[in-house]
């Protein structure tokens, strides 16, 4: 029964299963490295982040994503490096991956700079056909008998950063790579462009507002964007409300225990036909900055 239900979801979201090639994070505003490699080193510390996201709770075979990233500036120069380990699971497909990043800062003046980032690595597309129950007319051979394929992936990004604001553009998967090991399919890892921007505004001594956005444009996927409004209280507590175009709303809470440790939770609520069939999407986030350089970041809690 589970296999049949999984197959129905697999077919219903076939575009998402084989076309959704880059994860969507609801708490990316606390780890911009997840959407732009140029962010590497921006926290002036050995920065780590761990997230777990489970989508469409109640659906068999719904997407799940685990992500761990680490990045740091290199001492006494304008360069930074980073690593990302991720595992995506959706239906009968899983994609473990590892990516290495390098960024370089160019100072504009005393309080602003440009950062350029390049990221590259390998993705392992694994297709577990045995998890599916094939009905009449569906032939597993059409997907290919080899359910394992390694593909190279490269990303590029640029960011303009000040202590209170940022704007960035990234291109993910700039190389055109086939992802299904079968002559019957021409599914490819298409390029996704992300435009991000945000700015802090002081309301009072203890209250700050930060509007921010991300716009996603894919060469073969839907146009998407988020509009976020975040409120920070007492330099410690964050509450964020998000409108996600053509999807619904996101509510999240984030706490900075101190300058090093912070954690958060986000709940995605679709406001479309999916709402009656599932109970939303949950995302957990934990971050820790190791201040090994004994250097104070100018904006550790702004972004």
Image (cartoon, grey):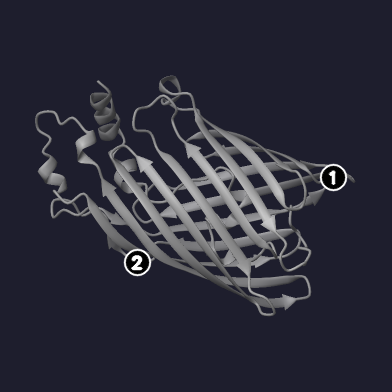
> Residue at the right extreme?
205
* Position in image of residue 191 (x %, y %): 38, 60
Quadrant in the rendering for residue 298: bottom right
User: Which of marks 1 and 2 precedes in the sequence?
Assistant: 2
Question: Residue 35 at what x, y percent from top left?
Answer: 52, 56
Which residue is more in the foreground, 228 or 295? Answer: 295
In this picture, residue 140 sits left or right of residue 91: left
Marking on residue 203: 1
Verify CB contact (< 8 Å) between mark 2 and mark 1: no
Between marks 2 and 1, how big is the CA–CA gap? 44 Å
Q: Residue at x 32, y 42 (%)?
A: 17
User: In the image, what residue occupies the spot 45% across and 62% down?
Assistant: 99
Q: What is the secondary structure assignment of the residue under circle 1?
A: loop
As drawn, is 127 to the left or to the right of 81?
left
- Estimate the x, y position of residue 27 in percent, counting from the top left: 59, 44
For the C terminus, which image quadrant?
bottom right
Quarter where residue 206 is shown: top right
Height in image: 66 above or below 80? above
Q: Which mark is residue 175?
A: 2
Q: How many marks?
A: 2
Check the image and report above or below for 49 versus 140. below
Other-residue count near label 2 (Cα within 10 Å), few / some / many at <14 / 14–19 / ≥20: some
Which image quarter is the N terminus in? top left
């Amino acid at each position: 029964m589970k296999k049949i239900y999984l197959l129905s979801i697999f077919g219903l979201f076939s575009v998402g299963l084989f076309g959704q090639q880059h994860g969507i994070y609801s708490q990316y505003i606390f780890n911009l490295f997840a959407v732009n490699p140029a962010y590497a080193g921006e926290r002036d510390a050995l920065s780590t982040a761990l997230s777990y996201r489970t989508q469409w709770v109640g659906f068999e075979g719904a997407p799940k994503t685990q992500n761990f990233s680490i990045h740091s500036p290199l001492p006494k120069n304008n360069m930074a490096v980073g690593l990302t380990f991720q595992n995506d699971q959706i239906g009968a497909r899983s994609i473990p991956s590892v990516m290495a990043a390098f960024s370089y800062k160019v100072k504009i003046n005393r309080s602003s700079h440009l950062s350029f980032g390049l990221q590259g690595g390998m993705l392992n597309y694994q297709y577990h056909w045995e998890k599916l129950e094939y009905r009449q007319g569906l032939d597993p051979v059409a997907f290919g008998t080899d359910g394992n394929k390694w593909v190279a992936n490269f990303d590029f990004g640029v960011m303009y950063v000040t202590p209170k604001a940022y704007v960035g553009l990234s291109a993910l998967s700039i190389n055109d790579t086939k992802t299904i090991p079968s002559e019957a399919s021409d599914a490819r890892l298409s390029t996704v462009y992300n435009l991000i921007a945000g700015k802090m505004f002081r309301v009072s001594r203890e209250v700050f507002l930060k509007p921010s956005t991300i716009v996603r444009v894919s060469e073969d996927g839907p146009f998407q964007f988020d509009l976020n409004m975040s409120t920070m209280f007492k330099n410690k507590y964050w509450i964020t409300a998000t409108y996600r175009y053509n999807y619904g709303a996101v509510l999240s809470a984030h706490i900075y225990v101190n300058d090093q440790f912070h954690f958060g939770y986000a709940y995605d609520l679709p406001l479309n036909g999916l709402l009656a069939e599932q109970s939303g999407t949950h995302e957990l986030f934990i971050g820790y900055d190791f201040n090994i350089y004994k250097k104070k970041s100018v904006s550790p809690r702004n972004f």
